Amino acid sequence: MKKILLSIAAVSAIAAAVPAVASAQSYGYDRGPDRSYDRDYDRGYGYDQGYRGDRAARLDARIDRGLRSGGLTRNEAWRLRSELRETARLEARYRRGGLTGWEREDLDRRYDRISAQIRYERHDRDYDYGRRY
């Protein structure tokens, strides 16, 4: 009788543990759908729209943070935002006809340049913490 009870207890413990192990998420390098955007460019019409819009939004948020922290002056933020708007307009124009490889690379270069300009302007010691009298 004890052997039967022990075997039933062992089987039920294993049966309870299997779903917990199966539902565990695997974390690590390059796992999951959100980390595969660069491999999924050519998956069909409109597949990569989230990546581009997300990148522009992140750059705009960096400009906001730089302005609030004083790392960017209002003029620098205005100039960076105008370049970001111009790139977003160009991206919309490219998307109307479908993005080619060259157009993707062009947009990447433009976004990279804006990102580098934000980094440079935030660390150029040209602070704007408010008006000084």
Image: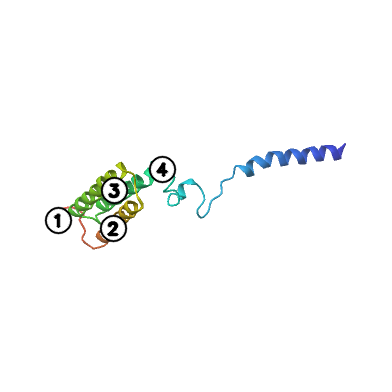
Q: Which residue is under mark 3?
A: 60
Q: If you read the primary sequence from the N terminus, does the residue marked by circle 2 or circle 1 appear first?
A: 2
Of pointers 1 and 3, the one earlier in the residue sequence: 3
Please report contact status of discs 2 and 1: CB closer than 8 Å, yes or no. no
Amino acid carrying mark 1 in the image: Arg
Check the picture and name the quadrant holding the N terminus: top right
Q: Amino acid at mark 4?
A: Tyr
Name the kind of residue labelled 3 in the image: Asp
Judged from this view, the residue extending furthest toward the right is 1
CA gap, disc 4 to disc 1?
A: 49 Å
The residue indicated by pointer 4 is 47
Nearer the observer, 74 or 106? 106
Residue at 42% over, 52% down: 38
Q: Are marks 4 and 1 in contact (CB under 8 Å)?
A: no
Question: What whole-number distance in Å separates the C-alpha atoms at marks 4 and 3?
Answer: 22 Å
Counting from the top left corner in percent of width and height, residue 35 is at 46, 50
SS assignment at label 2: helix
State which quadrant residue 93 falls in.
Answer: top left
Which residue lies under the disc numbered 1?
A: 132
41 relative position to 131: left or right: right
**Foreground tag (3 vs 2):** 2
Dot 1 and dot 3 residues touching (CB under 8 Å): no
Q: State which mark lies toward you, 4 or 1.
A: 4
The amino acid beneath tag 2 is: Arg
Q: Which residue, given by chain and number where applicable, does mark 2 sit on?
A: 113
* Mark 2 crowd level (few <14, some 14–19, many ≥20, 10 Å Cα): few
